[in-house]
Image: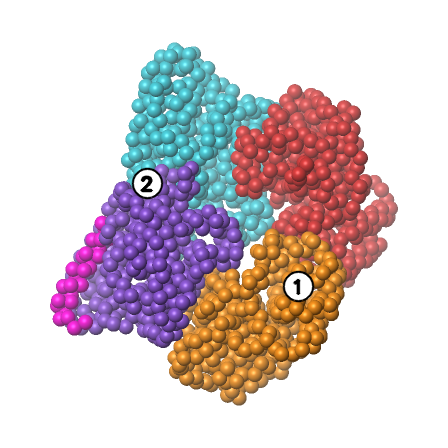
Chain colours: A purple, B cyan, C red, D orange
Amino acid sequence: MRPITRESVPADAQRARAAKRYGAVRAATEALAAPLSAEDQTVQSMPDVSPAKWHRAHTSWFFETFLLVPSLPGYQVFDPAYGYLFNSYYEAVGARHPRPERGLLSRPGVAEIARYRAHVDAGMTELFATLDEACWTAVAGLAELGLHHEQQHQELLLMDIKHVLSVNPLQPAYRRAAPPPRRAPPPLTWHAFAGGLRQIGHAGAGFAFDNETPRHKIWLEPFRLASRLVTSGDYAEFIAAGGYRRPEFWLSEGWALVQQQGWTAPLYWQQEKDGWSIFTLAGRRPIDPAEPVVHVSFYEADAFARWVGKRLPSEAEWEVAAVEAEVALAGNFADRGVLHPLPARGDGSLEQMVGDAWEWTASPYVAYPGFHPAAGAVGEYNGKFMSNQMVLRGGAAVTPPGHLRLSYRNFFPPASRWAFGGIRLAEDA
Amino acid sequence: MRPITRESVPADAQRARAAKRYGAVRAATEALAAPLSAEDQTVQSMPDVSPAKWHRAHTSWFFETFLLVPSLPGYQVFDPAYGYLFNSYYEAVGARHPRPERGLLSRPGVAEIARYRAHVDAGMTELFATLDEACWTAVAGLAELGLHHEQQHQELLLMDIKHVLSVNPLQPAYRRAAPPPRRAPPPLTWHAFAGGLRQIGHAGAGFAFDNETPRHKIWLEPFRLASRLVTSGDYAEFIAAGGYRRPEFWLSEGWALVQQQGWTAPLYWQQEKDGWSIFTLAGRRPIDPAEPVVHVSFYEADAFARWVGKRLPSEAEWEVAAVEAEVALAGNFADRGVLHPLPARGDGSLEQMVGDAWEWTASPYVAYPGFHPAAGAVGEYNGKFMSNQMVLRGGAAVTPPGHLRLSYRNFFPPASRWAFGGIRLAEDA
Amino acid sequence: MRPITRESVPADAQRARAAKRYGAVRAATEALAAPLSAEDQTVQSMPDVSPAKWHRAHTSWFFETFLLVPSLPGYQVFDPAYGYLFNSYYEAVGARHPRPERGLLSRPGVAEIARYRAHVDAGMTELFATLDEACWTAVAGLAELGLHHEQQHQELLLMDIKHVLSVNPLQPAYRRAAPPPRRAPPPLTWHAFAGGLRQIGHAGAGFAFDNETPRHKIWLEPFRLASRLVTSGDYAEFIAAGGYRRPEFWLSEGWALVQQQGWTAPLYWQQEKDGWSIFTLAGRRPIDPAEPVVHVSFYEADAFARWVGKRLPSEAEWEVAAVEAEVALAGNFADRGVLHPLPARGDGSLEQMVGDAWEWTASPYVAYPGFHPAAGAVGEYNGKFMSNQMVLRGGAAVTPPGHLRLSYRNFFPPASRWAFGGIRLAEDA
Amino acid sequence: MRPITRESVPADAQRARAAKRYGAVRAATEALAAPLSAEDQTVQSMPDVSPAKWHRAHTSWFFETFLLVPSLPGYQVFDPAYGYLFNSYYEAVGARHPRPERGLLSRPGVAEIARYRAHVDAGMTELFATLDEACWTAVAGLAELGLHHEQQHQELLLMDIKHVLSVNPLQPAYRRAAPPPRRAPPPLTWHAFAGGLRQIGHAGAGFAFDNETPRHKIWLEPFRLASRLVTSGDYAEFIAAGGYRRPEFWLSEGWALVQQQGWTAPLYWQQEKDGWSIFTLAGRRPIDPAEPVVHVSFYEADAFARWVGKRLPSEAEWEVAAVEAEVALAGNFADRGVLHPLPARGDGSLEQMVGDAWEWTASPYVAYPGFHPAAGAVGEYNGKFMSNQMVLRGGAAVTPPGHLRLSYRNFFPPASRWAFGGIRLAEDA
C-alpha cells in the first residue's frame, strides 16, 4: 500500500488530529465487540472467519509491529508470543499461527486482549505526543494505514460474528432490533453513460490503498446501470424459476459449486413453511422482498444477471458512473446501526451505489497498469492477493462510515458468500 | 447397560445415600471445571474432543432425559433446544448436533450452563425426595448409571482440556503444580500366573456397565505380567533405537499412521535441545525417565512390545492377574491431584495395575459371550461401539476415585492417543 | 507364514509333484485372465482393487524374489524395476509403488507381463529340476506358499475385475452365462452344538498359513448354527423393513457408513422398476431370492442378524461346527464356473459351509494364543494385518478349488463389500 | 463459438475442401495415437487428464452429436450409451460420465473406438457428399468448429499422454528421438511498442472461436517485450537463488501451493546428482539451458518475473506486439515432430512468439466487451469457463500446425502445470 498524504496542515495539528482519530477508530472496534460474550469472541466457524477477540488483537499487533516497535524508543512488546499468534499473513514479519486454527485458542482470553489493546493505545498516545517532526512525517502514513486497516477489521468482525451466530441452532442475535417497516418493492430504471476514453483510480490528496493506484486511462463503450440493487423479491423469482437447477445460467465453476455445496438460495436464507427467512445480525426473520439481496457469491450474481438477460458492470463502468453521477459518500453504513441493506426509495435516481451491499463486478482483481506495491512488509497488504478474486465496489451496511472511496476496490474469491455481496445490473447501451 | 443393584439396604437409606452421592459427583464435575475460563470451556481442538461446557451440559441432559422427564411429574425441561444440542449419540432419543461442530457453539455460555445444571439438580433433589417406593426401585439403576456416566465425563473433561491447551502455542497449564521429585527408574520383574479354565466379567452385587457382563469362562495358557508399566525412559530407548523408522515392529495400519501423521514420539512429547519434554495438565516440562509413558496409541504400545520381544496382555489375562494378585482399588487417581502417572516404587510387587495409566490390551472390544445390551435408549451406551476398538484396563491418573472395577472395560480405537493409555508387558510362561 | 510339510514322500516325487502343481496353478491364473482385454487388465477402480495384469506380475515377483533370486544360481531378474512395481507390501524387501497408483501404469503392458511370467516359469522349472536335496527341503515350503499365494490372487483377480467392470456404465460381463434355474427359497433349520473345552487351529500335516496356528484350546457355550446362508430374498425383506433407515440394528461405525456412503442395499444391487438387480461376473440380472446374499459388509451382516434377533457365529463356533459336522471340502468353488453363490438345497443338512460365500464371523482377526509369524520377509504375509479386520470362514464361489481348509482364516475390514462376504446366522443354545 | 466463414468460394468447392480437410485432421489424430498401446490409451493419471482413447471417441462424438444426428437423414448413432460416456461438459446435451472416472473405463476398447471413428467418418463423408446447398451453409460452421475442436484435442492428447507416461517409474518415451544439438544460451534484448488506443480481437474472414470476438478498443501505455522466451538456464538460476523458498516473489495463492504441493521446480524437472533432468515426450534427459522453460504454472511465471524485476505482458500487449511485429504463423509446432520447445536463435528479432511454448499473460480470462456466446449447445464451448483462469498466447510445440491465430486465446487455471506453459517477460517503457 502506498498511502498518500500531501496535505498542507501544520504538523502539530496533524498529529493531534491523528491522535483523536486513532482514539475514535479504536473505540469503535471495542463498541462493536461489546455485545459479545467471551465465548462469542472465541469461536471460529470456518477457516475464512476469525474470532472477534483475534480481530481485536490483530489490529493492535499491526500498530505494535509497524509503528511502536520501529518508531517508539523504549517500547516493550506486550508479549513476544503475540507476534506469532496475531500476524495475519505478513511473510516478511515471520512465522505465524495457522489461520484455520484461530478458533482453537482459548488463551489469551478477552480480558488479556483488553489489556493488550490498552498497552498498545498507551504506546500510540506516547508516539503521537513525542515523535519528532521528521519521524512523524515518516510514520504518519503508516498510522493512517493502521486505522483504515482497523476499519476493515471492524467490517470483518461483523461479517464473522454473523457467521458464527448463524451456525448455532439457537440462532442468537448479535443485537436485537425491530425490522425496518415494509415498503413496496421499488421500480427499476436504467441510467445511461457515454463511452470513450476515461480514467479511473485514485489520484487526489488523502488516503487511498495502493491497489487503487495509479490513476490510468481505460476505454469504455456506452453502457447503462440499473437504478437500484437487485432485491430479495427479484432473487426469489430467480429461485422459483429454477435458477439453481438450470446450468445454462452458470459459469462452469459456479455450477460445480451449486452441486457440490447443495446451494439452493443465498447464504443465510432458509425455506420456511410460508416462504424464505433470512438470518441477520438482529436474528432470523422473513425476507423483505423490497430489500437488496445479499450474501450471494459472484457466481450467483452472474447467473442471476444472465437469467434476466443482463450482465454485471465492470469495475471501470461502476467507478465512472459513480463519479459522473456525483454519488455522495453517504448511505446505509454501519453507523446507522441497521447492519443490513435497506430497500431503495425507488425515486429513479442512481441509488444505493454506496452502503447497503458491496456490488460484485465482472472484473477480476488485478493490478492497475503501472501498479507497484508499497515498500516493506506492508507491501503485502494488497498486491499478493491479485489472483482468483473478483472486485466489489461501493461498501455495505456493515462498512464503517468514512471508510469508503469511489475508487475503493474490495475483493473476494468468486465463491465467497459470507461478505455482504449484492447485485447491480448493467447492460450495453 | 444393565446396572445390577441387589443390595438389601432399606429404601429410604438407599435414596438418601443416592442423593448424597449425586451431590458429590455433580460437585466434583464443577470443581474440575473451576480453573477454566469461559473461553477455555468453549474450544474443541479436534472432533474427538468436546468443550468443557458441553460435558457439563451433556451430563445434565442425561439426568433430565432419562430420569426427570419420564419420572418426575410436572418437570419442565430447561430448554427444549438442549435435547438437540446435548445428546451425544443416542439415536433412539432423536436428532442431534454434529459432534465435530461442538466447538462452534458460543451459546449457551458457561453462565447459562451453570443455570442448567442447577435446574437439573433441583429436579433430581425433588426426585430423590418424592419418588414413591415402586418407582424408586425402577429409577435407582438409572440414577446410578447417570453418576457413573458423569464420572466418565469427568475423565473426558480432563483428557479434552489437556488437548485443547496443548494446541495453544502459549502452552498454558490447567493447574500449575511442582513436578513430583525424581526417583531412580524402577527395576522390572515378572509375575507368573497359571493357565487353566477361568472366569472373567462382573457377577456380584454393585454397579457394573453392561459390557462387563455376563461373567463367563475362558481358557488361559500360563503367562507372566511385568511388575510395572513401561516408563518414559524405556520408551525413549525405543525411539532412539529407530522405533518409529523400522516397519518390522508395526502392524500395517500402525505403520501407515506413523508415516501419514509423522509420528516420532508419543502425543505431547516434543524434542528439545537437551532431550524430550512433555505437555501435562501442569504445563510443559522435561520427561521423567522413571514415570510411565502415556498418550501412546495401541499401535505404539504393540510396536514397543515387539521391539523388546514381549507382547501386550489379553484383557482376560489382565483381569485374572489382577484378581489373583488381589489388587486393591487404590492408586494414583484424579483425587490425588497429580493428573499424571507417577513412577513405580519398584518393590517387586505387581504395581500400577490401577490408576496411573490405562493399559492397552491385545483384546479387541467385543461382546462377552451371551451379552445383551440393556433395554431402551441406554442400551446404546456401550454395545454399539463394539467394532474397531481395543480394550484398556485399570484406570488412570485422571480417572475419578471409586469409579474403577477390576472388571471395568475401557475402549478406544487403536489409533487414539489423547486418552491416558500406557503399556504393561506380558509374555507366555 | 510357517508352512508345515512333514510328509514322508520321497524327495524326487515331491519335487515332481511340486513342479506339476506349480504348472497347474500358474496356468489357472492365465486362464482366468484370458477373457480380459489389455484395457480390462489395466484399470484400477478403487484403491482396494489391483489391475489384473498387476496380479499376474505380482505373483510372479513373489516366486522371483523369495525363490529364484536366493536359490537359483545364475538367475537373472527379468527387470530390476519390477521389484519396485510389483512388491505389494513387504517392507523388508524395500520400497514399492504406491498401491492406489497401480492403475496409472500402462507399462509394462500385458504382452510384457506374459514374457515376465514365462521367464519366471522357466526359472522355476529349472529350480525344480536342479535343486539339490538339502536346498529343496529348505525351499519346498516357500514354493508351496507361493502357490497358495497365487491362488489367493486368483480370487482377488475375480473380485477386482468384477468391481472394475461394475463401475462401467456399459456393465460388461466377465463371462456371459445363462443364470442358473430358479428354485423355491430353501427353508432354514438350526443345528445344535454342545459347549465345552475344544480346540481350533491347524495342527496336522499339510500346508497351512501361519495365522491358522497354533492349535489351541477355547471354551464354548452351547450354540446353534443356521442350516444355510441368508438368501437375497431374506435380505430384501430386511431392506423392505427399513433396515438401512433404522439405527437400532447397527453398530455405530456401520450406521455412520450407511449415512456417509448412502448405502441402501448390498454392493452391486440396484433398484429397478420391478425389483432389485445384481451385477455378477456374468453381467447384470435380477436377484434370485433363493440365492445367498453376498457383497455385504460385516456391518450389514451384523445388522441383519440383529434384525432377526440372532447373531453371527464366532470363528471358533464356525470351525468347531464344521469339524463336528464333518463338512467336506467340496462345494461351489471357482472351478464350477458359476462364480456366484448358488441356492441351498434346503435338505436340512448343514449346507454351504464351504464355497458359495465367505461367512462373516463375529471374531476380530487377532493372533491365536502363542502365535509367532514366520521368519524373514514372508513373516509379513499375515501377522501385520491383525487389527481392525474381521475373520471370514469357508471360501466362496470365486475361491480356487483345493485352496480352502476348515481352519482357513480369511479377513477383511468390517466395511469391505467387494469380497464375496455373506451371512450365516447363529444363536445361543 | 461463432464461426465466421464469409468466403466467396463456390459451394461445391467449399464442400470438397471441407471434406478433404476433415480427412486430414481426423487422420492426424490417429497418427498421434499410433505409438500408443491399448494400455497407454486407457490410463488417466489425474482428473485433468483424459485417456487417449477418450479423446479419440469424444472428438467423434462431437461430429456425431452436433452434425450427424441433426443433419444427416437416417444416420444411426453408433451406440446410444456413448452420448453419456463421451460428452465432455455440454450440460444442454444431457448427463455425462464424471470426468475423474474416465480412466476407470476399460470398455469400449481401442478396437471398438476405431470402429466408432470409422462409423462417424463414413457418416461425415456422406454428409459432405449429400447435403443440399441450404443445409450446407448452416452446417459448414459447425463442421469447421468440429475440426478446430479436434485439433485442440490433438494437443490435449499429447499433453495428457506425457503426464500419463511421466508418472510411470519406468519413464517410458512416447516417441524416442535424439535430443536437438546444444547451442549457446541466446542473448535477450527488448522490443519497444508505443502506447495508445488500439484494437484487439478477431475481425476478418476465416474461422475464429467466439471468445476472440468482438474486436474492440483498448488503451495501452508504452511497453517492451523480451525478444525470446525465458530459458531453462534462466529458470535454474531462479531456483538456485531460492526462488521456491522466498515468499516475497509470490502471489499468496501461489505461495500456498508451493508449500502444500512441495513445488521446488517446474513439473517434469527432477534433481539429479549432476543437475536437473526433464521428462519429455522423448523420455527423460538433462535440461538444455538454452531451451525455453515450460510446464510452469502462472504463479511460477509471475514469481520468476518479479524476481528479475519485470512482469508478464497483458494479452492485449501480446496481441498488439505480435501484429505490429508482423509475426508469421510459423514456428515449432507439432508437425516438426520435436514436441518440445527449441532454443531461440538469439538474432535480436522478436522470436518464439508462436510455437514452442504457450506464453502466460497477466490477463484473467474474461469476456471481451460485447461478447455473446454462440447459440445452442456449442455456446458452452468457451464462455462458461470465464472465471479463475488466465490467458495464454501463441501456441506450443504440441499445437497442430495451422491451428493458431494471433488473436487465439488459450486459458488454464493459474495452478496448471501440465500444459506447455512458458514465460515471456515484459516491462513498462
Q: Is residue A300 magenta?
A: no
Q: Is residue C87 left or right of residue B387?
A: right
Nearer the observer, A413 or B103: A413
The residue at the point 52 percent across, 41 percent down is B414
Chain of residue at mark 2: A
- Residue D298, x across and y down, in percent: 48, 69
Q: Residue furthest bottom?
A: D347
Q: Give the image location of residue A36, x and y in percent.
A: 27, 44
Cα distance, mark 2 to mark 1?
58 Å
> Looking at the picture, which amino acid does disc 2 mark?
Pro
Residue holding disc 1: D67
**Chain to which mark 1 belongs:** D
In this picture, residue C344 sits left or right of residue B98 = right
Counting the numbered discs, the total is 2
How many C-alpha atoms fall within 10 Å of the one at disc 2: few (<14), some, or many (≥20)?
many
Give the numbered dot on residue A172: 2
Of residues B30 and A183, which is closer to you in this image?
A183
Q: Which residues are magenta?
A: A7-31
Residue B93 percent location from the top left of the image: 46, 29
**Which is nearer the eye, D311 or B272?**
D311
Q: Which residue is located at x 30 percent, y 47 percent?
A: A183
